[in-house]
Amino acid sequence: MSGDGVGSTTRSAGPQGPGLRREAIGLREVLFQSITAMAPAAAIAASIPSGAAFAGGSLPLSVLIALVACLFTASCVAELARRMPAAGSVSTYAAQGLHPAVGFLVGWGYVFVEALVPPLLLLQLGFTTAGTLHDEWTSYPGDLWWPWSLAGAVIIALAGYFGVRASARFGTVLGIFEVLVFLVFAVLLITRAGGDNTLTVFGTSHTAPGFEGIGGVFAGSVYTVLAFAGFEAAAPLAEETKDPRRTMHRAVLGAALSIGLVYVITTYAMAVYFGPDKFAGFGGAGAASWDGVARASFGLFWVLVFLAVVNSTVANANACATVSTRTAFALGRIGVFPRAFARVHPVRRSPVAGVAVQFVVAVAAMLGLGFAYDPVTAFLLLATVIVTVIIGVYIVANLACAGYFLRRARAELRPVRHLVFPVLGIVAFVPALLTAAGIPVFDFVSELSSPVSYAGPVVGVWLALGVVVLIVLARRHPDRLAETARVHLDDDVPVTHPPQSGAPQS
């Protein structure tokens, strides 16, 4: 890396004890790590249709705009992942591009929300399976959701325990299945639509009443942006991947682009089949849903749609459990998290302490919130917490990209890719952040009601606790804090850190 005239150069000893399994997986598995983290089937069936209330039959245009917007941030993350292949991923990027203190806080928040994604998806697995079984056989209790959620938690824990090869290949199989089911369904819908196929859905003539024109399309895109969350999930697997610099870059961008195109195709297919001018009412229950259309028009194909959505919940939970355990491993390795998180299985090289903690957190959050409220309300509460933090992480990643190339790699700076794209990425995600947090800056944003409104205080308390830990680290262990910027695959290359008060100089 080129010098920027600030900071000191330190060289640290390698990590003590065995680390993660190096070069265990390739591009295919890493690509599907990001794809399954985006949960395409669940996003197509549940998340994206929420934008129809604003964009109506012009929702395909909203999805296309969201794809372009997300590619700006995906490009920034991919650029950083290529230069800093590290299990710490976004934490390392922020530490290098901005400051180790920012890197710690990003890692603190990222571990928190990624650990909450598995219970979120396990709740969806439970209530989706229970509700479908009840609809088919009324003798099955519609509120008996928790056995399915527990079964999913055990499967994910076992996949994590058996190591990155097992969990990544498991995710690959699940990801291929869910994408294929919805692509086949999209082809059937387009074929059945026949003469009703029209490119006018990529214009503004079919927006919902009260949200006419480009304003409705923009509102729809803000809700659709949330379906892209997870494209960066390949990055924490960098230290276990073959040719990580090249593979990480291709996986992050490839996941965002490929699944974005799947979103465009499937949304177009349903819009022209269902009818663009009545599509504003799509996305509820019954006939106005993917499951309802499959039941009404394609016979038993609804079973495949149901299995794809259930499959998507398990795959997403598995991918995000991998992210949380690897990020916790990276932070435990340098001592800013308990060292136990850096403990790996002597044979499988999986972070067993992280896997065990992830399992306990998933089961406790899932059952605790699911029984305290109900599984759907618990799902909404967790989803709001997760999306609020993850979008904040994306905004910081954009800033880190600009900071890294301005401060550390000026010779490699490309103004459009490293300055313009980060600004556009931030612009794209700020409205989504306000929407997720329920801050009614725009007329299409609804204020959150309790208990979902508790998400803000929960995030605030966790970040405040992180600031306290940060202050303690800065005073007692500034060297550990500086290590958040370290790329462990580059142990033989000096790493430049910004100056810190009290940090040892070499």
Image: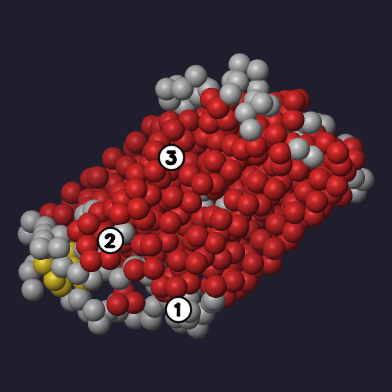
Residue at image point 70% right, 48% down: 265
**334 displayed left or right of 145:** left
Across and down, in percent, residue 298 comes to 90, 45
Residue 359 can be seen, yes or no: no
Which quarter shows the N terminus? bottom left
Q: Amino acid at mark 3?
A: Phe
**14 displayed left or right of 303:** left
Residue 248 can be seen, yes or no: yes
Instruction: Give how far apart the Cα atoms at labels 2 and 3 are.
Output: 23 Å
Query: Mark 2 Cα within 10 Å, few/some/many (few <14, many 20+)?
Result: some
Q: Earlier in the sequence, mark 3 or mark 1?
A: 1
- Residue nearer the viewer, 130 or 478: 478
Residue projecting furthest to the top: 210
Q: Which image quadrant for residue 160?
A: bottom right
Indicate whether 52 appears above or below 136.
Answer: above
Which quarter shows the C terminus? bottom left
Query: Mark 1 Cα within 10 Å, few/some/many (few <14, many 20+)?
Result: some
Across and down, in percent, residue 93 comes to 32, 59
- Read off the residue under disc 3: 429
The reply to whether discs 2 and 1 touch (Cβ–Cβ < 8 Å) is: no
Q: Earlier in the sequence, mark 2 or mark 3?
A: 2
Q: In the rendered structure, find residue 413 and report the number of the disc placed on it.
A: 2
Q: Earlier in the sequence, mark 2 or mark 1?
A: 1
Determine whether the residue tagged by mark 3 lies in a helix, strand or loop.
helix
Instruction: Give how far apart the Cα atoms at labels 2 and 1 are.
Output: 23 Å
Q: In the rendered structure, find residue 243 and report the number of the disc placed on it.
A: 1
Residue at image point 85% right, 47% down: 191
Across and down, in percent, residue 468 comes to 23, 45
- Residue nearer the viewer, 447 or 480: 447
Q: Amino acid at mark 2?
A: Leu
Residue at image point 38% right, 81% down: 18
Determine whether the residue tagged by mark 2 lies in a helix, strand or loop.
loop
